[in-house]
Amino acid sequence: MPTKVDELKEEIYKWDNTQKICDFIIWWALEVWSSDIHIEPMTNSVRLRYRVDWSLREIIEYPVFLHAQIIARYKIMSWLKIDESRKPQDWRISTTIDWKALDLRVSSLPTVSGEKIVMRIVDKSKKIPELENLWVEWRNGILWAKAISMPNWVVLTSWPTWSWKSTTLYSSVNKLNTPDVNIMTLEDPVENVLDWINQSQVHPDIWYTFATWLKTALRQDPDIILVWEIRDKETIDIAIEASLTWHLVLSTIHTNSAAETITRIINMWIQPFLLPAAINAIMAQRLIRRLCKHCKKEIRPEELDENMQKMIKKAIARTPKDELLSRVWEEILKNPIFYTAVGCPECQNVWYKGRVWMYEVLEITPKVKHMILKWNSWIEINDAAIEDWMISLEQDGIMKALNWHTSLEEVYEAAKENA
């Protein structure tokens, strides 16, 4: 029985319809729930890869002589210069495939073997999930909802890039979107157009940056401001000023954990005494793969390897005592059952299908505030936050593993990145 790979090979090796080949590459990426398409020229062939559930999968290789035609077709679709192959180019394709409205963010890059194309797929037909449906555990969900309901700056920290921070931001803004508030956003790029929200996109070539936009936005009588990313001191200065003048500012910054965000901001020459007044919460998130429900296999704690057992013991030891969280842990650990990956045709033998979030929300409590004002290290700030009942990324991941959403292997890999 022919597979999808066979169908794609058949289309490509006909060599007679470049448009059909290009459409088929995009269509098949949608079929396997790919987030990115990589077309990479090598010396003797061209490699096509898809990023599915975080991992890159090699699909096929096709002859080099087809590459120029395929690259030219995608450039025409995205209004890029066909005759420019010496420097990178970026734009987007708006198209419809199988009744789905798509945006493809196209990036071309010259390499020694030719131009490489990467296309990020944004399915505009998908609805933005409700904030309550983002797999946020009960305590983190309460803290984040409380943070975004207050007129102070809150920060979403995200590392690595593939953490779907945009989904969390859009869900948060959607929850706040009511007729009595003025919401303004500056994004890079605008991934989803939201009703009744004033959205802009940066244009560095005309000096329309995050900092210059923020100055203008504050004269537009905003209640809520979303700045896609904090990249420099000027932007963060204006964001703090906006927060101190009673504006809710949501933004992102690239750090490994919520506590490290504090030291990252201080390293951008911001005085520590400003932070407790301006920031009320910081959320860190990771995206980990969800176990395939058709082939996951039950595993008992005693069957786990030494690293997994150490991680669980450490997470339990750091759980606050005499608090509801302790009782939750005791209850779920009375008869703990985890699941591990096996592989089946449904998940194409890669064990996972879909993704799930891990979160931690650092609230600026009096203890954390004291640590910030004393210029303590991020490790000490993190320990103080855990003493004040912060659920760490590691603990949140273990809870999701105990609820059978993911495997401990996935949680362990994410915890290692955060170590």
Image: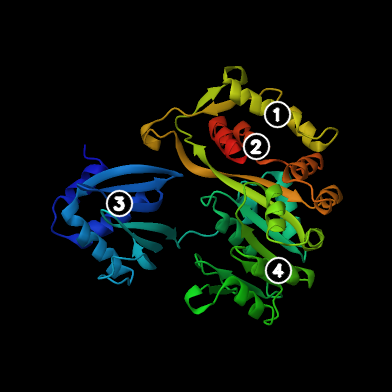
Q: Is residue 377 left or right of residue 33?
A: right
Q: Are marks 4 and 2 in contact (CB under 8 Å)?
A: no
N-terminal label among 2 and 1? 1
Mark-to-mark CA distance, 1 and 3: 43 Å
Q: Secondary structure at mark 3?
A: strand
Image depth: mark 4 or mark 1 in front: 4
Residue 206 lies, with reference to residue 96, above or below; the image says below
Mark-to-mark CA distance, 2 and 1: 9 Å
Q: Quadrant of residue 386?
A: top right
Check residue 237 in the rendering and tell me which mark sits there, or answer none.
4
Q: Are marks 2 and 1 in contact (CB under 8 Å)?
A: yes
Mark-to-mark CA distance, 2 and 3: 36 Å
Mark-to-mark CA distance, 4 and 1: 38 Å
Q: Residue at x 51, y 44 (%)?
A: 355
Residue 35: where, in percent of width, then height?
42, 52
Identify the residue under disc 3. 40
Q: Secondary structure at mark 4?
A: helix
Image depth: mark 2 or mark 3 in front: 3
Residue 342 lies, with reference to residue 21, above or below; the image says above
Identify the residue under disc 1. 314
Residue 223 in sight in this render: yes
Q: Is residue 11 left or right of residue 93?
A: left
N-terminal label among 2 and 3? 3
Image depth: mark 4 or mark 2 in front: 4
Q: Disc 3 marks which amino acid?
A: Glu
Mark-to-mark CA distance, 4 and 3: 41 Å
Identify the residue under disc 2. 394
N-terminal label among 1 and 3? 3
